[in-house]
Image (cartoon, coloured by chain):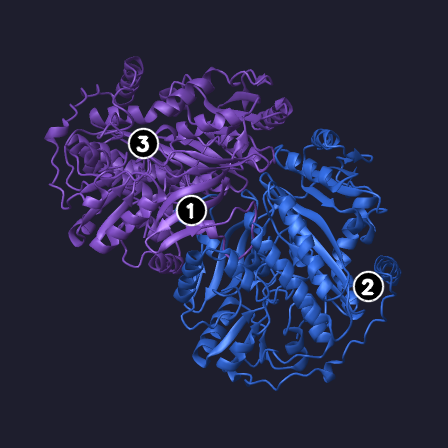
Chain colours: A purple, B blue
Amino acid sequence: MFNTDRKFWGWGVESNAFPQPMLMLARAFLQAKFGVPPAEPRAVPSLESLRMPEPALAVPAAFADIVTADRYHRAVHTYGKAFRDVVRALDGDFSVAPDLVAYPRDEDEVARLLAWARAENVAVIPFGGGSTVVGGVEPDRETRASRAGVLTLDLCRLDRVLEVDRASRSVRVQGGTYGPALEAQLKPHGYTLRHYPQSFEFSTVGGWIATRAGGHYATNYTHIDDFVQAVRMITPQGVLATRRLPGNGAGPQEERLVLGSEGVFGVITEAWLRVQDIPRCRAACTVNFETFAGGVAACRALAQSGLFPSNARLIERDEALFMGAGDGTHHILVLGFESPSLPQGDKLEAALAICRAHEGKPKKPQVRNDGEGGASDDSADQWKQSFLRAPYLRDELARMGYISETFETCTTWANFPVLDAAVRAAAAEAFAHTTGQGLVTCRFTHLYPDGPAPYYTIIAPSRAGQQLAHWDTIKTAVSRALVENGATITHHHAVGKDHRPFFLMQNAALSLDMLRAAKRAVDPDGIMNPGTLL
Amino acid sequence: MFNTDRKFWGWGVESNAFPQPMLMLARAFLQAKFGVPPAEPRAVPSLESLRMPEPALAVPAAFADIVTADRYHRAVHTYGKAFRDVVRALDGDFSVAPDLVAYPRDEDEVARLLAWARAENVAVIPFGGGSTVVGGVEPDRETRASRAGVLTLDLCRLDRVLEVDRASRSVRVQGGTYGPALEAQLKPHGYTLRHYPQSFEFSTVGGWIATRAGGHYATNYTHIDDFVQAVRMITPQGVLATRRLPGNGAGPQEERLVLGSEGVFGVITEAWLRVQDIPRCRAACTVNFETFAGGVAACRALAQSGLFPSNARLIERDEALFMGAGDGTHHILVLGFESPSLPQGDKLEAALAICRAHEGKPKKPQVRNDGEGGASDDSADQWKQSFLRAPYLRDELARMGYISETFETCTTWANFPVLDAAVRAAAAEAFAHTTGQGLVTCRFTHLYPDGPAPYYTIIAPSRAGQQLAHWDTIKTAVSRALVENGATITHHHAVGKDHRPFFLMQNAALSLDMLRAAKRAVDPDGIMNPGTLL
């Protein structure tokens, strides 16, 4: 069938191991930071050794060619890729595995599977690429008790760009299309979506839409939301298809009922997406800041300037060092502009003038207008490589007994100092009760005129057997700090099961009532992804 | 009380008459176009002569100081400002007048009024500024029959900017604040919202949010949606308040349940809005095109260029002539860029190069970087003046027996030629069955990378007594052409009662079910603006 190289216990594919030299550097950094040598990585359990119940459902005869109860496929679809998922997988705990995994070939099969599930009281989990770090695809324990079983839907066979509208620069694409497959199909047309979440390689168009994924652009087009022109979703009550409209003012925006729905309303099978011409003009520069506050002030001015940099990531010095993007002496701002045809050097200069006004020290600007690759300097290149490899490193940290977690959020510029202090205080307090020590670093992933999207990375030395309890204490403390200090529990990682308690705190009770009522309208039996989001 | 100068029969205030010299020019244009001299304008009925039922409700003692059953206030709040509203008002038909009008002073009074209305089975209509052209505030006939009465809520006393957050460049403002009052309160802070719908003078912040109003910017920030950071709505079930977040990815976006809700969920009492620094750098130019298709091609290239002009209005030659913005020999593109601090001349040059590549002939560019007023040429100035006065002219056309209607929509670039032909064919067919002749002109109000927002103006010679029947035939035919040809029934005028049949056609049946279910969650007795939207 499919996914035969996918790791069931962690990020990505078996054949793509984390580079040993980089691992050595990370170990050295951690030893220096925490004063104790990292433990040797624990062994990965074999597929055969996993503790997994027998499937509660038999493969229905009508779906024999697209549904499997195979142990490997169930294991691959048990968890997402959250830190606790990796630890539980390393523990061999697959007690919540889905009973069946379906690989439908078309929309009709999706609809028939939902009809079957509804008739048989089976919960359905749309899997996307399974890259969720918030428990978005894991079968719910309560659901397992109250339902006949759990069916996970993997749409990886719906992987094609079906239509290209050149005049409107938009494409119709199937929901199961992975990032690299999408880009490969767009490239011959001179197009790109330029939506590069960290999960790019292992996430799908449908998953991006269901989770409102954050992407490449640091400003203006920050979420997949901005590229969705129309969407098709199969619900237990039938098809919800919106029309292709560049702009619309007719009532509450229809697509917004689908964007962020995390599989609780239905399965996203298709979308019309707004694509981009491939950029050929780029201008980039890394700017050093002595103080993080200086970088914050520069980012605020940039965000309010109307310049719309495509890249503007402010990275705290420790994180830059850990990611190999700096020597740890400065906080850095990785700044970039791009366009298919308009040279961007002047914009970069205007942005650098803003940075200088806030005591930023630019390195050498890189400007290219010939389409031959990117324009970036060493720090930026190094950071980008590390960015895409980070989830593999996270797996290794889990194996070595560390806690590794990220918190991404958004708040106003006025509130950022308050939030930042609260996050660090909450983490310190949680460390004191768990690991004794820990590292908190911050970067800005996206910038808005009214505030930044801060992204916190937390690493702390724990040990196998205690990681889950330590993680839970730290995760809860920092999550609570976010929602109690004017921020959101998620800017772009979604809610899933892990963030749900905090989502329920941050949303208005009445808007939650509205969403629950809306769910009942399309999923009256509540079979869609129970326990997630609502 | 309030609104003492507001016209009960048409646009704006009694004291602001349409200038006679401009009216003469319009009459000459219409005579030349249709070959018959315009009729003398019919008389405006006196307040005393209006046919209006006695109020079905007595003013509740508990609200004696904020509720009135006064004839003038009921008349002012009977209709919006649609063409058919003006004709019915000129006919003296106020048979659907609300029974009572409330002017609450604070949120608590709004909540108490809703509680009273719920207990007494009274329908509630949030009025905003009453500038709706789609029947958004008119009491529904069926409602009048099934309810104890109708209460219209006018929030004009909630008219203040309550808080300014300079770091986050955002302000907290009350829902009843009119456009000019908002700008007057922002100006001392160096801020502007730069949200200038044609209704600017007579519409409110709450109304903009409830209707997803379209504003000043031709690209990127096209709707009020883009400026809403958080919102407060009083529903019959209580307060729905969202938190201030520059960006958020937690579930379906909460504010989107309020944006476009047209009063059917609740009353918008407050919002945090993202404001702008007042622009001091401007670059503008008018570009002539021999063919409208040439202008369309230039607009598409501009929309996909990433230049984000603040103004890019393509105006068909007949409309430019009628509006006094051209001599009728060319289609014109009114193009402008602006920034608080960055000179925009280079961007304008890049945009003009794109126009020239599509056979556009720019007039003299106007560039100013000193903040002293605007940068625009005669055509642009003339057009802007005419734009704001157009609703007054529409009233005069109605008095002279013409049909005057506008259709604003949005579609993809690929589909625009199909849509345009369908709109013109539908209008021609409708003219043949009604007025015998008529004028259809088009402009683009907003541009998206994937399509334009075309705005059609229709003027046809009818006569008093036949206008409503003629209007209905033409309005229905063209509206049907929009939704049957891949466009939306409204890009920014909202749905109200007039567009409702077409909204129900264009939205997915399941998304309508979701919205109806969401409404029941906050308005279980259905008292909020019945007959509108859903």
Helix, strand or loop at disc 1?
strand
Marks 2 and 3: in contact by CB < 8 Å? no
> x and y percent of residue A70 in the render?
17, 35
Label 1 crowd bin: few (<14), some (14–19), many (20+), radius 10 Å: many
Q: Type of residue at label 1?
A: Arg
The residue closer to the viewer here, B462 or B306, is B462
The residue closer to the viewer here, B220 or B329, is B329
Residue at left offset 14%, top offset 32%: A92
The verdict on a common chain for dots 3 and 1 is yes
Residue at left offset 63%, top offset 65%: B129
> x and y percent of residue B109 in the render?
51, 72
Query: Which subunit holds the residue at mark 3?
Result: A
Helix, strand or loop at disc 2?
loop
In the rendered structure, the answer to whether residue B274 lies left or right of residue A63 reads: right
Q: Based on the displayed image, in which of its 4 quarters is residue B51 positioned?
A: bottom right
Q: Earlier in the sequence, mark 3 or mark 1?
A: 1
Tag shown at residue A112:
none
Helix, strand or loop at disc 3?
strand
How many angstroms separate mark 1 from mark 2 (CA)? 49 Å
Tag shown at residue A458:
3
The verdict on a common chain for dots 1 and 2 is no
Label 3 crowd bin: few (<14), some (14–19), many (20+), radius 10 Å: many
Q: Nearer the viewer, mark 3 or mark 1?
A: 1
List the single residue furthest toward the top: A21
Residue A245 visible in the shown view? yes
> x and y percent of residue A518 in the render?
38, 58
In the rendered structure, the answer to whether residue B63 lies left or right of residue B191 reads: left
Badge 2 is on which residue? B18
Q: Nearer the viewer, mark 3 or mark 2?
A: 2
Tag shown at residue A232:
1
